[in-house]
Amino acid sequence: MEQQFNFSPNPLVKFLKKHPEQFTREDIISYMTENDIRLLNFRYPGEDGRLKTLNFAIHSVDHLNKVLTFGERVDGSSLFSFMETGSSDLYVIPRYQTAFLNPFSEIPSVEILCSFFDHTGNLLELAPENILRNASRYFTESTGLEMKMLGELEYYVNSPTDSLFQATDQKGYHESEPFAKFEWMRKEALRLIAECGGRIKYGHSEVGNFTKEDEAFEQHEIEFLPTSPEMAADQILIAKWILRMLADQLNVEISFAPKISTGKAGNGLHFHMMILKDGQNIVMENEQLSATTKKIIAGILDLADALTAFGNTVPTSYLRLVPNQEAPTYICWGERNRSALVRIPLGWTGGNDMAEIVNPGLTKDTKSPTNQTQTFEFRVPDGSANIHLIMAGLLIAAVHGLNMDNALEQAESLYVKGNIFHTSDFKNLNQLPASCYESAERLDEKRDVFIGSGVFPRMIITHTIDKLKNFNDINIRNEISEDKDRERELVIRYIHCQ
């Protein structure tokens, strides 16, 4: 056990010899006191999805204890547009398990994520982070199951063109140095994210790779490991912050925006889901997709158009969701199918000991094939997504599917095999919205499902609809095709969305 903690990249885990989920207030005080750390920063996302900061210069153990116990007051109306200035005071209360050592600060400081509480001392009903917490609880209480989730975070690095070892246009997938100029930056990001508590599966360069005038755009992806929805959201927030901090230090621009240029790959923020019953993954049963999984997929497909209101929140989102690219357009699902809205990725169910085949003489692993890593993937959201609300929406959609009388029939009818654009099947499928305005209309049509769950406050749904309609982008695709200056203006406007 001692060796396990020593191997952890997280300095607090190494010092405290316990997992973050077990951190206490006394642990944070002990770590800061014994390491002579006098700066504490509270972090929390505002409506724009970016981490905000409140700094404390700690002058005594008693001061630190009070800050960690009682939190502090903040102006909610400056953080969320749905908060009224007449009654906007909020508390921010630290969540000890999220504490990490700031890897960028010259003066050592501890960072800790916070939750919002209202004037009554209760969790703020309207806070996206609390909505996700309630959605996770609602899913488990309604189904007796547990949902684990992970995100695939895609981003572009924008820098001056380098004439040496230029990568091939739109062929950047898993490219290596020297053709992938910012592989080393990605690896540094992986190291820092892990130190800050992120649980990473891997990182790699992505398809998007192009030059425009004297600028080079290079796409990368970081994928995390399955964890609780709340933890999955936290680590995406921290990863975005770390990537932006690195980019600022290197004097390059980084963007999670859904579209940088038409005709080029956009930035998705795909979410994988895993269903557990009594601690066991039940996505597959007897080497086949389980009935439970199919019902959940049916629920997601039934609400997919409305979910874009949380996962695709700026006009450039709908320049990514176009036919004949890897981003989904039609509401369907498939196995190993990247043209589908929901994809069942390749799992480890073949039965062969593949390592033994390519490593002759290796002791054969006689264990049966495992389905414990199998997930299913929702491919619609992009870098503009409100992380907490889209994940909460997926949990609501999962329960919705399990309660649908015809869920299995719906799943069967919406299954596609192979690239949907190479068959005539897609002509019978419903399409995703083509603009923020249309997305708002779809959410309005299905608002009762989200509000009826008791998870989404009515005000949040109304606020989301109004905000999307205010873009007035109903003809966005036609406008862009006829006016390239308009395209560039939109890209620049939303380059740092969320």
Image: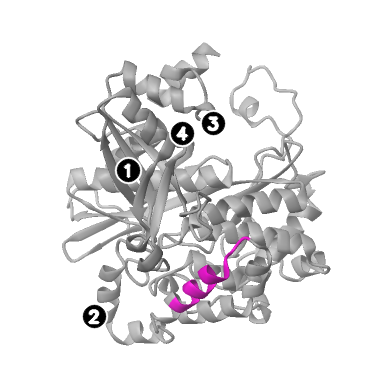
- Of the pair 377 and 83, the residue shown nearer to us: 83
- Which of discs 2 and 1 lies nearer the camera? The answer is 1
Sequence-earlier tag: 4 or 1 = 4
Query: Could you say where residue 382 lies in the image, as x and y percent from the top left?
Result: 45, 62
Q: Residue at x 66, y 64 (%)?
A: 300
Q: Amino acid at mark 4?
A: Tyr
Q: Is residue 446 left or right of residue 282?
A: left
Q: Amino acid at mark 1?
A: Ile
How would you rate the neighbour count of disc 1 (Cα within 10 Å): few for under 14, some for 14-19, many for 20 or more? many
Residue 457: give x, y in percent of width and height.
57, 66
Residue at x 32%, y 69% (from the top left corner): 261
- Mark 4 residue crowding within 10 angstroms, few (<14) / some (14–19) / many (20+): many
Identity of the residue drawn at 82% across and 69% down = 406
- Type of amino acid under label 3: Glu
Of the two numbered discs 1 and 3 on the same chain, state the one appearing first in sequence: 3
Earlier sequence position, callout 4 versus callout 3: 3
Residue holding disc 3 = 21
The secondary element bearing badge 3 is classed as helix
Marks 3 and 2, the one that precedes in the sequence: 3
Crowdedness near tag 2: few (<14), some (14–19) or many (≥20) residues, C-alpha within 10 Å: few
Label 1 SS: helix
The C terminus - image quarter: bottom left
> Is 161 drawn above or below residue 459 in the view shown?
above
Mark number displayed over residue 426: none
In the drawing, does residue 267 fall left or right of residue 451?
A: left
Residue 231 shown left or right of residue 168 in the figure: right
Which residue is identified by label 2? 485
Q: Which residue is mark 4?
A: 96
Q: CA distance from mark 2 to mark 1?
A: 32 Å
Name the residue that disc number 1 marks. Answer: 242
